[in-house]
Amino acid sequence: MSGSLVVVGTGPGKPELMTPATSAALARATDLVGYGPYLDRVPVLRVDQCRHASDNRVELDRARHALELAASGRQVAVVSGGDPGVFAMAAAVFEAVEAGDPVWRSLDIRVEPGVTAMLAAAAEVGAPLGGDFCAISLSDNLKTWATIERRLVAAAEADFVIALYNPASKARPHQIGQAFELLRTKKKQETPVLFIRAAGTAEARVISTTLGSADPSVVDMRTLVIIGASTTRQVGRWIYTPRGERSAS
Amino acid sequence: MSGSLVVVGTGPGKPELMTPATSAALARATDLVGYGPYLDRVPVLRVDQCRHASDNRVELDRARHALELAASGRQVAVVSGGDPGVFAMAAAVFEAVEAGDPVWRSLDIRVEPGVTAMLAAAAEVGAPLGGDFCAISLSDNLKTWATIERRLVAAAEADFVIALYNPASKARPHQIGQAFELLRTKKKQETPVLFIRAAGTAEARVISTTLGSADPSVVDMRTLVIIGASTTRQVGRWIYTPRGERSAS
């Protein structure tokens, strides 16, 4: 049997948010490759399954290792959190394919969609992504801060709801504050801002504030930040963005 | 027992892409409210469950009906496709709460996240959403075409990957062509464009083309359109967007 590689996402954390298609793909795999904490979310599905845990931030090494295993005939699952195509391992796998052994281009490679963090975060508070929106990774490991600023400005001009992934890490504690400073020059101070930590897990915690009052020091690696559009509002204990500008009937 | 309302999404279509949390919420409901074709995706889970099917484009009526049922003590599930918070029923429910009976604000209302169409569409072709991206509904039923054009221009300026929901309908066959005309003035003609029909179903079909050659006549209501960023590219038979601008190690 020839090898294969499937890139999957465990969803935001709760087992009930992992799709049955992903569970089935994990059960078929002979080898699981991923960042340790994501692999830990996968229950033991078969005793002959090898787990290859790696550190964070070595995505390309991990992708190459997975491709080598698949090329050697193994049935490999690369395990991300969330959806594997959104700021996760799928793009790293194709980067490795492009730069690597030409044989890898004929491998059986598939991607299974999953529930990405912003969807779980939005569901915790209501429907803040109810209008047009964008998703920006605030990490400048692979792109310049100038690019991130240009995208924040364009997002404000478009009046998109903004979902910020990777808003802070130990190495980058200050960028989320810089992003708020920039957005305060472009958007109203009363724009709703949501800090949603560990969305889609039993430990989910929400801080609902405004752009003018947002305290960036509460943000960490497990926080997803949502910044409203001009129409985003509170009703009862929920925050939502209406579907359009006009009232509907 | 007092009433409740949960807004769920069936995912893109295949039963294996509906989360277990959504299946459990559907099994608990006494009443399912939704657009007929989405309700048809839900297997019969209990014989005492009432189904309230409605036409498309009557979202607020449907939301009000669901809220009335919940206020009368029923356990109601409002059924969307995809993720309920992305161009689907969750925002309509909160619009109805805001405009409706103040009693509705104290109801037990929850949203369950799901796999939205663009994630399933991206997975069909590789990882086109691997960088920063935006999602725009091309429907001008509830917002002006000028707003949509402003967002397309900003998305091009930001160099976002663009996912277009609701790109065409029988009543709006020409807007996707207008969107391409506008984007051709802002982005390179060789930018990858993907038409992904019925993503996440057994009938999924992909057309991979470029902005310069994209034929809008192939687009229908079941098509999700993805327009690449400047970095989006082909490798082997896959399309992907690298995670950043710099090559990583």
Image (tube, coloured by chain):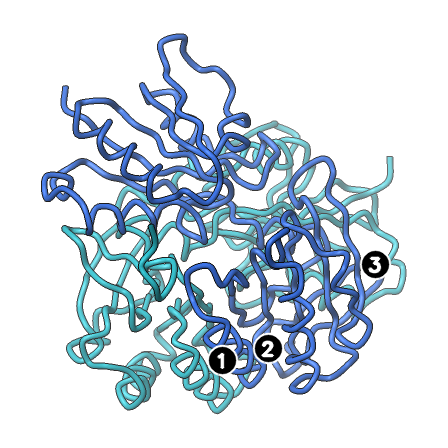
Chain colours: A cyan, B blue
**Distance between mark 3 and mark 1 Cα atoms:** 33 Å
Chain designation of label 2:
B
Mark 3 vs mark 2: same chain?
A: yes
Question: What type is the residue that disc 1 sits on?
Answer: Arg
User: Where in the figure is residue B201, as x and y percent of width and height?
Assistant: 67, 38
Where does label 2 land, which residue?
Answer: B244
Query: Could you tell me which residue is drawn at 18 percent across and 80 percent down?
Result: A212
The residue singled out by tag 3 in the image is B237
Amino acid at circle 3: Arg
Q: Chain of mark 3?
A: B
Looking at the image, is A248 positioned above or below residue B240? above
Give the amino acid type for the residue marked by disc 2 in the picture. Gly
Q: Secondary structure at mark 2?
A: loop
The residue wearing badge 1 is B150
Q: Secondary structure at mark 1?
A: helix
Is B1 placed above or below A241 here? Answer: above
Q: Pinpoint residue B196: horizontal percent, then vertical percent.
A: 70, 53
> As rendered, which of B144 and A226 lies closer to the eye?
B144
**Which image quadrant is residue B233 in?**
bottom right
